[in-house]
Amino acid sequence: MKNIKDKGTILIGLLEKYSKFFEVAIAFLLLAVITIKLVDVFLVLIDVDIAIMNMEFESVLTLVFNLVIGIEFTKMLIKHTPETVLDVLLFVIARQMVVHGEGNFNILLGVIAIIGIFATKKYLVDAKKYRDDELVLEEASLAPHETLEGEGGAKDGK
């Protein structure tokens, strides 16, 4: 039974590492697209009629937001914490505002919803409880002679 639990924590650790890797990769790709679009704007300003990238920036944002929401949803399935659920909701609302920002009233509702999510995270979610669980998970995935505080397994300097 313990062997299955160890494999589960290793698998969870791998999934979290892969999700972080994908987040960074998406960020770099988005920066590359922004750079290409800046060159496009510069070429338009100097009156050169060459389109480097034909894809609309809104389409790129839609694709990026969908990928990020998928990654956050995966994290939510792995961690099972209210904080990850709120993160998914935050990205979904932000996507709705940026991609489909139709009208000032809808944008205002989105801003109010985001404020509500941040207030919920700050005042209603007991993040310390879940951080302690993550700390236990991290220590379980370390080698037997390692701890988060240092070598040899002594936590409190004892």
Image: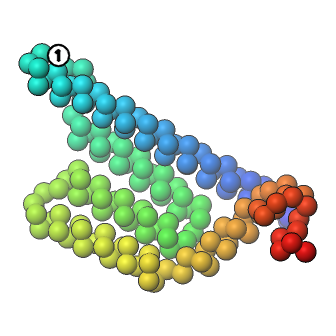
Q: Is residue 4 visible?
A: no
Position of residue 1 relative to residue 102, above or below, is below
* Residue drawn at point x = 88 percent, y = 68 percent: 154
Locate the C terminus by quadrant.
bottom right
Report whether 117 appears left or right of 125: left
Quarter location, residue 18 = top right
Q: Is residue 90 above or below residue 34?
A: below
Total label count?
1
- Residue found at x 44% / y 78%: 122
Q: Residue at x 24, y 30 (%)?
A: 38
User: In terms of image quadrants, where is residue 7?
Assistant: bottom right
Residue 72 appears anywhere in the view: yes
Within-10-Å neighbours for mark 1: few <14, some 14–19, many 20+? few
Which color scheme does this rendered protein use? Answer: rainbow
In the image as oriented, which residue stretches furthest toward the bottom?
A: 124
Q: Farthest residue in the front direction?
A: 157
Q: Secondary structure at mark 1?
A: loop
Q: Percent position (x, y) of residue 119? A: 37, 78
Residue where numbered disc 1 is placed: 50
What amino acid is labelled 1 in the image?
A: Ile
- Judged left or right of residue 116, residue 22 is right
Is 14 placed left or right of 30 in the picture? right
12 vs 154, nearest the viewer:
154
Relative side of 122 to 36, left or right? right
Q: Can you tell which quarter of the image residue 29 is in?
A: top left
- Position in image of residue 14 (x %, y %): 67, 49
User: From what the image shows, is residue 66 above or below residue 123?
Assistant: above
Residue 1 is situated, as x and y percent measured from the top left of the image, at: 85, 65
Please name the residue shown 48% across and 51% down the image.
Answer: 71
Q: Position of residue 60 (x, y in %)?
A: 29, 38
